[in-house]
Amino acid sequence: MTVGILGGGISALALAYFLKRDYEILERSSNCGGLCTTFNKNGFLYDIGGHIIFSSNKEILQFEVDLLGDKIHKKRRSNKIWYKGRFVKYPFENGLHSLDKEEIFDCLRDYLKNDHKKPSNLKEWFYYTFGTSISDKYMLPYNEKIWKIDPTLMGMEWVERIPKPPVEDVIKSAIGIETEGYTHQLYFYYPKEGGFQTVIKTFEEKLNNIHTNKEVKAIYKEGKTWKVETNNSEHVYETLASTISIFDLVNILKVDIPEEVKKAVQGLRYNQMAIVLVGLNKIKFNDLTAIYVSDKKSLAHRYCFSAGFADSLSPPGCSSIFAEITFNSDVPKEKIENKEVIDKTVLWLIEEGFIEKSDVCETDIKHIKYAYPVYDLNYVQNMKTIYEYFDSIELNILGRFAQFIYINSDVCISNAKKLAEKLNLKVKV
Ligand SMILES: Cc1cc2nc3c(=O)[nH]c(=O)nc-3n(C[C@H](O)[C@H](O)[C@H](O)COP(=O)(O)OP(=O)(O)OC[C@H]3O[C@@H](n4cnc5c(N)ncnc54)[C@H](O)[C@@H]3O)c2cc1C
């Protein structure tokens, strides 16, 4: 009754943790972590973009806090928007007072006098929710930059991630009274040592049967069992849970997948991402966690400042900045000039006055193939087809790129817990 778990990211580890059955984890890389991996370049540690422990689900947040115990510390978020050469409080609608008076007026007028019709796509949703000026000045350019697709072609299924501010907050923010948005991440937790991957390592300490360097190459259904072939082994399971990307899964699944399911998978859009590390020979910005930049002059949409997370992310006396840059999935990795991307990132930081050239003592770049699922207008229909098919063949799919949902690790843990409860029940009957 062993459960075969394909992939070794946080979804897989959390599933194993909650299972009351035997399991085996097969991970392609030499270590577990997936998107929760922390890289190390000569003592400069950096996550795959800003990774923090937070959740609007109190039970899951408490679970993570208890799991990590004294390995984590609590920090206050200090995210800002970098807009026309100045800091604006994050989220934008809570920082209106930092804009020029004319711009404040425009934002407030359009927010209060908003006759945009009920939305049918993401662009319309921004106009409908925030009014024309806030949308045009920040929301739309920022979202165009991260999603690399016209927002009229995107759906609204993920917008619950963008809290809608109360009217009072927007008025207060416009006249300079402090307000807070996104309060569920105002305080966050972060590992004192080892970067975000410490969350993964803590799970690993409590688990066994994790097999790394096992790339799943083929999956066969044989009667009621699943045969899984890796680069160097063969396994048979009665129950299978796959956390590897849905694209890779359909390629290695050796069953007759209906054409409409293949088409639905091919129809899904996603973005890849590059993370650029800029190591500094001094401690800078320990009062800042991240900045969001909608200006197209900056390749990156977000920059994170290591000193705002943990001193241990850099060698003594040093700090770092890591920049997140998305690319369409169809841009070949070989076409991305690493040196050019790094140079442009450093140059932007210098030109905007964040660093001086002489501060930079280390750089690095990593590419992440599956970074962001993109919710286009066909997303819901495609996912319905895909979910119904995988339900019908009883292959459990779990995780950000397996279920193809824009979720953070807290939701991965919560979904893993639900799946474990379902699979635990099965063994009792
Ligand atoms: C830029 C960015 C910022 C984020 N910020 C946060 C944040 O602040 N807080 C937060 O909680 N979450 C954050 N997240 C989300 C979080 O990283 C993901 O939700 C989570 O890590 C997904 O875990 P997963 O296990 O579902 O998938 P993955 O991490 O993708 O794991 C899949 C695993 O499968 C393995 N695999 C793939 N193919 C095979 C194969 N053929 N055989 C065997 N193994 C295979 C991979 O190597 C990988 O380890 C962020 C994500 C991104 C991209």
Image (cartoon, helix red, strand yellow):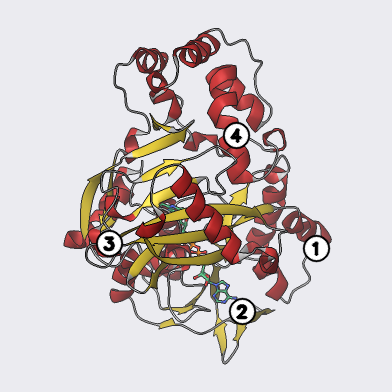
Residue under numbered circle 1: 258
Q: CA distance from mark 2 to mark 4?
A: 46 Å
Find residue 24 and report its image quarter.
Answer: bottom left
Residue under numbered circle 4: 141
Side (left or right) of 159 relative to 393: left
Amino acid bearing label 4: Pro
Side (left or right) of 423 relative to 193: right
Query: x%, y% of residue 1?
Result: 47, 79
Amino acid bearing label 2: Trp
Q: Residue at x 16, y 61 (%)?
A: 70
Q: Nearer the viewer, mark 2 or mark 4?
A: 4
Looking at marks 4 and 1 on the same chain, the residue that comes earlier in the sequence is marked by 4
Mark 2 Cα-neighbour bin, 10 Å: few <14, some 14–19, many ≥20:
some
Q: Which mark is residue 100?
A: none
Q: CA distance from mark 3 to mark 1?
A: 54 Å
Residue under numbered circle 3: 318
- Residues at badges 4 and 1 in contact (C-beta under 8 Å)? no
Residue under numbered circle 2: 226
Q: CA distance from mark 4 to mark 1?
A: 39 Å
Looking at marks 1 and 2 on the same chain, the residue that comes earlier in the sequence is marked by 2
